[in-house]
Structures are given as structure tokens and as C-alpha cells.
Amino acid sequence: MSDFLLYLKRFCDSSKVRCWGEVVLALSLIGISCYAFADDGTDLLSGTTANLIKTLSGTGMKFVYLTEGIVSLAAYIKTKNLLVLSGIVVVSIFFNIILHVVNG
């Protein structure tokens, strides 16, 4: 029995088996993903742009500023560079410009 297990271990460790295993895994993942993309063409995200703009114009903007402030404060503590804190202003201005462009 131990000879068979030793043979099986050597067989599974060979590069040909590993290569064919990767090919079979890749082909099976491609086959499974076909079901994920089999849709009738309806846009599931239609109408979400208005909700996103409304959220980001209201309370969502507070969370964006809060997150940017925490991240820039952590970066300042790590680097001890005051220019990192100026990123709050730059990101805020950039974000507001993008929102105004998207709103039209």
C-alpha cells in the first residue's frame, strides 16, 4: 500500500500533472463564468447615477471628508510631512469639481 501512495505522490508532483491541472481549472472557471455573463442585456445599474449624486451631495460628502481627514492624518503621522495634510484641500476641491461636472 505504501508503494502505491509513494507512486501517487510522485505522479501528482510531476510538472505535467500540475500543468494539466491548471488548464482544467482555468477552463472550468471560464465555463462557470459564462453563466454569470448570460444576461438578456438589461442594465442593472440604470437610475443609480441620480441616487449616487444625491448621496454624495448630502451626507456622503461628510463621510468622504472624514475618511480623507483620517487617512491624511495617518499619513502625516507616518511621514511627518505637512504637505500631506494639504491633500485634504486638494481632494475636497477635486471632488467638488467632479460632482459639478457630473451634475451638469
Image: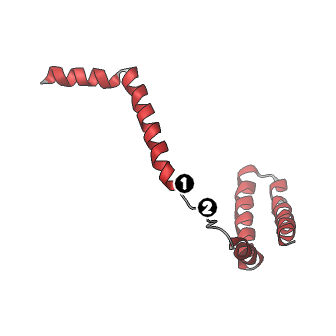
The residue pinned by badge 2 equals 41
Residue 67 place in picture, x, y as percent = 70, 66
Left/right placement of residue 78 relative to residue 84 reads left
Residue 76 found in image quarter: bottom right
57 shown above or below 9: below
Residue 40 place in picture, x, y as percent = 57, 62
Residue 66 place in picture, x, y as percent = 72, 70
Tell me the kind of residue under disc 2.
Gly
Q: Quadrant of the C terminus?
A: bottom right
Question: What secondary structure is marked by label 1?
Answer: loop
Residue at left offset 81%, top offset 52%: 81
Crowding at dot 1, Cα within 10 Å, few <14 / some 14-19 / many 20+, comes out as few
Residue 97 found in image quarter: bottom right
Question: What secondary structure is marked by label 2?
Answer: loop
Tell me the kind of residue under disc 1.
Phe
38 shown above or below 55: above
Residue at left offset 61%, top offset 65%: 42
The residue pinned by badge 1 equals 37
Q: Residue furthest left?
A: 1
Residue at left offset 71%, top offset 72%: 52
56 shown above or below 17: below
Label of residue 77 in the image = none
Q: CA distance from mark 1 to mark 2?
A: 10 Å
Q: How many marks?
A: 2
